[in-house]
Image (spheres, rainbow, N blue to C red):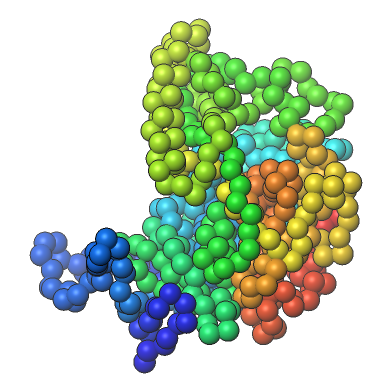
């Protein structure tokens, strides 16, 4: 049976892999080492160079999987979304382009968990994000500075990767790693019906009732034709440095890290606030003894331009080594070494959805309240805590798709807070629940009953005020 898709000239050949069953099964040594039986004669559809133009012919895509809720991107927003949706007993598939979950919180080595608190040091980020931190509490060297507001926690990236794997496997959702979301699947009415992925298995499709774009860059909603604003922001590269007994990111950065308040604790390390010039910095402590992490602000760049990303990454990796050489001149860091540089760049913002609601800077600063509130952002920089409405997750016109994470609908100054890891947990959890309710009630995400959404958020431990 062949199903034609009215976008991009794609034709999908129906097949299906039930990954959850494979993941639940114990591995068996059935494969034989060495040469294997021949596979299909044709495994690709190479592009054709014709009259100086590169043309990709129409091709048949296998359907890798079918699901009710498809979450594209396994970072903080995506993992929270997938876990939240699965708790409503719908089929969930989580797809991640790297070989691990957590995104910038793990592979990006952005280890600081802020902003968690309001101006009164009350923790406004709860729900699934708090569950993750409690699991880290139970692990030796998993997390430090917990429940010490206004100081925010710092996590160990490997411990966090492990926690996320455990939560994903326990949920019995389907998950695919090393798959890059490259396109949207649309029907003849312009409704999103899934996404196309590239992997070592080639180009394949996953069909879904509802798609959550948690790519960070809004790759799927952009491919589907949703309106968005392009943003250029600073792009850095985070690293960890070992064999050190000192820290040098102190309280001069603390004010911008935790937001406006009068109870600043002098001398408290700022846990990795960005630095522009890496002139021998040794960074801030992590849960692993003797290992610090060094955040990098980096220059303003275009995170959607592969040439610019490549140039920056090369320059950053060279700069990190020069920084190490200078750091060794400091007492307490004479024998320092680089433990790792992040495998993914520290992109802050690239696309912002133009959604059913665009959260404005004026509303953020005024502490506006919304009937469709789905969570809070904690106090950060010059902004006090503020509510996040559900409308920020919904495209203005596109159906069957939700956004979560740093690419949701907001003005630039607001998005500078919404992009942070705990806030991505908030928007991700809300998007996951909304997607599940959309499936269960057979309605589009924009028509989800907001009261039911809020009730389920509270049931899953989220803070709505």
Residue in the picture at 63% in, 51% down: 406
Query: Which image quadrant is residue 46 in?
Result: bottom left
Q: Quadrant of the C terminus?
A: bottom right
Residue in the picture at 35% in, 83% down: 13
Query: Which image quadrant is residue 338 in?
Result: top left
Of residues 183 and 393, the one drawn nearer to the viewer in this rendering: 183
In this view, 135 is above or below 56: above
Q: Is residue 428 visible?
A: no
Of residues 79 and 320, the one drawn nearer to the viewer in this rendering: 320
In this view, 250 is above or below 439: above
Q: Is residue 414 visible?
A: yes
Return the x and y of residue 375 as percentages of the image width and height: 77, 56
Count the marks: how many?
0
Return the x and y of residue 81 as percentages of the image width and height: 61, 62
Query: Which image quadrant is residue 86 in?
Result: bottom right
Determine whether, in the image, residue 230 is placed left or right of residue 325: right
Q: Quadrant of the N terminus?
A: bottom left
Return the x and y of residue 191 as percentages of the image width and height: 58, 79
In this view, 440 is above or below 348: below
Of residues 4 and 197, the one drawn nearer to the viewer in this rendering: 4
């Amino acid at each position: 049976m062949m199903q034609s898709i009215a976008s991009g000239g794609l034709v999908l050949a129906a097949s299906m892999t039930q990954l959850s069953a494979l993941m639940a099964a114990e591995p068996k040594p059935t494969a034989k080492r060495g040469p294997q039986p021949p596979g299909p004669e044709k495994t690709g559809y190479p592009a054709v160079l014709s009259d100086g133009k590169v043309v990709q012919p129409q091709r048949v895509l296998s359907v890798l999987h079918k699901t009710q809720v498809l979450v594209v991107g396994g970072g903080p927003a995506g993992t929270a979304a997938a876990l939240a949706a699965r708790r409503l007993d719908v089929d969930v598939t989580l797809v991640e382009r790297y070989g691990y979950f957590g995104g910038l919180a793990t592979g990006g080595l952005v280890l600081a968990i802020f902003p968690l608190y309001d101006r009164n040091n009350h923790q406004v980020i709860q729900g699934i994000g708090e569950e993750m931190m409690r699991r880290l509490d139970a692990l030796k060297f998993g997390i430090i500075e917990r429940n010490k507001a206004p100081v925010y926690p710092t996590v160990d990236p490997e411990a966090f990767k492990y926690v996320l794997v455990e939560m994903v496997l326990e949920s019995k959702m389907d998950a695919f790693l090393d798959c890059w979301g490259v396109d949207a699947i649309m029907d003849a009415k312009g409704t999103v019906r899934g996404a196309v992925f590239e992997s070592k298995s080639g180009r394949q499709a996953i069909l879904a009732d509802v798609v959550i774009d948690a790519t960070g860059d809004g790759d799927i909603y952009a491919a589907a034709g949703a309106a968005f604003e392009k943003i250029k922001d600073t792009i850095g590269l985070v690293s960890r440095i070992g064999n050190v007994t000192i820290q040098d990111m102190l309280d001069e950065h603390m004010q911008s890290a935790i937001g406006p308040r009068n109870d600043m604790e002098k001398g408290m390390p700022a846990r990795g606030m960005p630095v522009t010039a890496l002139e021998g910095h040794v960074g801030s402590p992590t849960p692993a003894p003797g290992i610090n992490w060094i955040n990098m602000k980096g220059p303003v760049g275009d995170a959607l331009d592969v040439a610019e990303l490549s140039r920056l990454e090369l320059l950053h990796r060279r700069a990190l080594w020069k920084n190490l050489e200078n750091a060794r001149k400091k007492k307490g860091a004479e024998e320092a070494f680089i433990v790792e540089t992040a495998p993914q760049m520290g992109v802050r913002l690239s696309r912002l959805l133009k959604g059913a609601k665009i959260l404005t800077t004026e509303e953020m600063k005024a502490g506006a309240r919304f009937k469709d509130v789905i969570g809070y952002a904690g106090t950060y920089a010059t902004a006090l805590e503020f509510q996040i409405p559900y409308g920020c997750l919904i495209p203005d016109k596109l159906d069957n798709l939700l956004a979560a994470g740093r690419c949701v609908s907001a003005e630039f100054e607001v998005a500078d807070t919404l992009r942070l890891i705990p806030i991505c947990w908030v928007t991700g959890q809300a998007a996951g629940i909304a997607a599940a309710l959309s499936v269960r009630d057979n309605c589009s995400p924009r028509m989800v009953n907001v009261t039911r959404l809020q009730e389920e958020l509270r049931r899953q431990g989220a803070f709505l005020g």
